[in-house]
Image: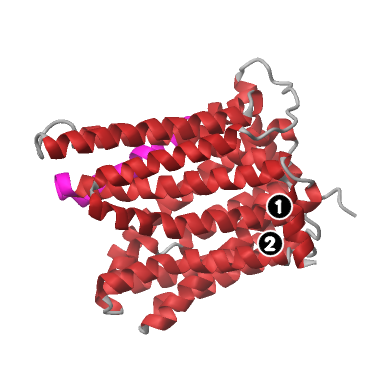
Amino acid sequence: MVKNTFRALFAERAFMRFWFARLAGTAASQMLMVAVGWQMYELTNQAWDLGLVGLYQFAPALLLALPAGYVADRFSRVRIVTACLLLQCVVAVLLCVASLQTSAANPHGEWMSRNGLLTISILLGVSRAFQMPAQQALIAKLVSPALLPQAMAFSASGLQAAIIAGPALGGALFVAGAATVYASCAALFVVGALCAATIHYFRSDSSDNVLTVESLLAGVSFIANRKVVLGAISLDLFAVLLGGAAALLPIFARDILHVGAWGLGLLRGAPAVGALVVSIALTRWPLRRQVGSKMLIAVGCFGLATLAFGLSTNFWVSLIALAVTGGTDMVNVVIRQTLVQLETPDEMRGRVSAVNSVFIGASNQLGEFESGATAAWLGPVGSVVLGGVGTIVIAALWWRLFPALARRDLMSSEQK
């Protein structure tokens, strides 16, 4: 059974090209952000400017979500993903040239400036605003519905591996200079674009050929009228919004666990390691029955693990708790993404994925703000404990508010 699962995925050539494209693109993106963040801090020594880098990338995703979803449904998703990867490659090349010119001519010159890095951040945000909906909507066209849960889990495993390896590789290459990191990013973006460009899939014509307000808002309307989809997406929004503790990890590492920078690195990587392990397990042993209740239970366990992390004063207990948050969140991610893709008609997947992307981005950004705000009020421990309890309450509340989601047995409503 296990061998047959992997053999079936590897036999899907279009899917494997997509997997390698996503792996290369995500690793390059992670490396790029390590270098941009480091250079920004070297230039300004202001934590505020580091926050602006993230904000300038999120703003285009929010502002362009609806048109990006329409474009993903109207035009070839393969070409959109390829173009977005090439745009990020151009950005990496520009940063490489700027780094070389700055270091060679004038370390404090205009080639590499605060405003230049913020402009670059906007370009990256625009690129990802169009890439994410097209990328999410594409995967369901590359495998059969029966194989989609395994494909989602296997795709997530590659994503988590890139999230773990990308920053580590970027940090290691930065020893040789920022230009080396950016050149490596450009090469990876080219590899990703080449893999994406060779993907072939059947594309049905969209019925919304004319751009109207109704066609732009079609994804929002679809989600609002499908309780299972609305419940799954909103559950993830509130769980991540309340349960995220990443923004407070430096405080826990230094003041509570007393482990310093090396411990902070391990704490930051622990959720990704847990997510990677679970995603590999879900590829081999996919969830087939009672997926709705398992999703809600996973979110409740995410809250419990967050609560355990907040109360822990032992480094290894905290590390395990964070790994559990990553693993339980991965169960939620795989079920949610599979449900949303299977419940959504292909001609709507781009717009629905765009709304989903905004929900994910908003929960991450607002979650960091919520953690900081409550930490200023209750302290770091109180903030994380409150978030963990809140996540558990949300899971229980959603069980009552969305009974169709809680009772959902199979991934697809058309399965028997």
Image coordinates for residue 136, horizontal then vertical, percent: 61, 42
Q: Which residues are magenta?
A: 42-65
Q: Is residue 165 visible?
A: yes
Q: Residue at x 24, y 55 (%)?
A: 175
Residue shown at the point (22%, 45%) measured from the top left: 40
On whether residue 415 falls in the magenta region, the answer is no
Q: Main secondary structure of the magenta part?
A: helix
The residue at which mark 1 appears reads as: 10
Q: Is residue 275 above or below residue 92?
A: below
Question: Given the image, on which type of amino acid does mark 1 rest?
Answer: Phe
Residue at image point 39% right, 65% down: 268
Horizontal side, residue 19 vs residue 241: left or right = right
> Which numbered disc, 1 or 2, marks the residue closer to the eye?
1
Amino acid type, residue under disc 2 in the picture: Thr
Residue 168, given in percent of the width and then of the height, sits at 37, 59
Residue 308 vertical placement versus 358 (above, below): below
Identify the residue at horizontal 24%, vertical 32% (top origin). Answer: 116
x%, y% of residue 115?
A: 22, 33
Report which residue position mark 2 lands on.
Answer: 283
Badge 2 marks a residue whose secondary structure is: helix
Q: Which sits in the foreground, 78 or 270?
A: 78
Give the numbered dot on residue 96. Answer: none
Q: How far, Cα to Cα, is label 1 from label 2? A: 12 Å
